[in-house]
């Protein structure tokens, strides 16, 4: 389902083509996408990026589309990975009270968040402060571009039911629609989310190591 088809489906299901309602459809869809991507962590919302820690700088900038960490590693000159441990800022400040304490970082913490006014994507704080320009590899979760701007998306191609009913929930909330219909949309959405969650769970399994999943009876 592409964005044009999704827009038409929303208008058909709600039987609403009023101008203000139609102008809000992009918002309904984006709100639905946000809800979905914060409910399931399918591989399509995960990225891998390499960058550098700078010698003497205890801060590491986050990617601009960053949502949450999956893992952060330092890669040495031999290509060996050392995965940093996630701690809070207080732990790092207490363990390394002086930023002049340097070495191969062992810990990281979320130091600050995005600052729109300065176009800053936020930073991690490292402990100890890097004593070299180390290569880093960050696996992280992000929010993919909306189908509103790209016309097609992974959700539209592979999980159009959850995208449709998520959008209908937002649209019908805007319309202050009939509670019985809203309840039906909610039920359909929740079933679609459960199906997507099973894909999410399957993507984290390996049949060779874990065995084939067994269906529950009853």
Image (cartoon, rainbow, N blue to C red):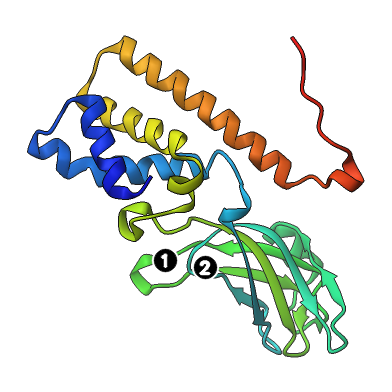
Task: Using the image, determine if residue 72 lies above or below residue 44.
Answer: below
As helix, strand or loop, the secondary structure at mark 2 comes to loop
Q: Quadrant of residue 138?
A: bottom right
Q: Are marks 2 and 1 in contact (CB under 8 Å)?
A: yes
Q: Is residue 80 left or right of residue 31?
A: right
**Structural crowding at the residue carrying mark 2, measured as other residues with C-alpha within 10 Å and reported as few (<14), some (14–19) or many (≥20):** some
Q: Position of residue 121 (x, y in %)?
A: 48, 69
Closer-to-camera residue (206/112): 206
Residue found 77% across the figure and 19% down from its top: 216
Residue 128 visible here: no
Q: Position of residue 193 (x, y in %)?
A: 54, 31
Q: Mark 1 — residue?
A: 115
Residue found 44% across the figure and 39% down from its top: 160
For residue 182, which numbered disc appears in the image?
none
Q: Position of residue 92 (x, y in %)?
A: 75, 65
**Sequence order check: which comes first, mark 2 or mark 1?**
1
Residue 49 visible here: yes
For residue 122, which numbered disc appears in the image?
2
The quadrant the C terminus occupies is top right
């Amino acid at each position: 389902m592409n964005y044009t088809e999704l827009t038409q489906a929303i208008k058909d299901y709600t039987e609403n083509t009023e101008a203000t309602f139609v102008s809000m459809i992009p918002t309904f869809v984006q709100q639905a996408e946000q809800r979905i991507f914060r409910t399931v962590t399918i591989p399509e919302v995960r990225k891998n990026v390499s960058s550098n820690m700078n010698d003497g700088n205890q801060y590491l900038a986050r990617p601009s589309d960053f949502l949450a960490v999956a893992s952060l590693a330092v890669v040495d000159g031999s290509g060996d990975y050392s995965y940093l441990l996630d701690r809070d800022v207080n732990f790092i400040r207490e363990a390394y009270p002086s930023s002049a304490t340097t070495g191969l970082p062992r810990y990281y913490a979320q130091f600050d968040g995005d600052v729109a006014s300065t176009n800053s994507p936020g930073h991690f704080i490292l402990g100890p402060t890097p004593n070299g320009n180390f290569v880093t590899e960050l696996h992280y979760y992000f929010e993919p571009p909306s189908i509103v701007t790209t016309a097609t998306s992974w959700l539209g191609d592979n999980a159009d039911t959850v995208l449709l009913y998520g959008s209908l929930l937002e649209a019908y909330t805007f319309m202050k629609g009939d509670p019985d219909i809203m309840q039906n949309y909610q039920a359909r959405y929740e079933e679609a989310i459960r199906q997507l969650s099973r894909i999410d769970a399957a993507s984290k399994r390996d049949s060779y190591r874990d065995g084939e999943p067994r269906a529950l009876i009853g």
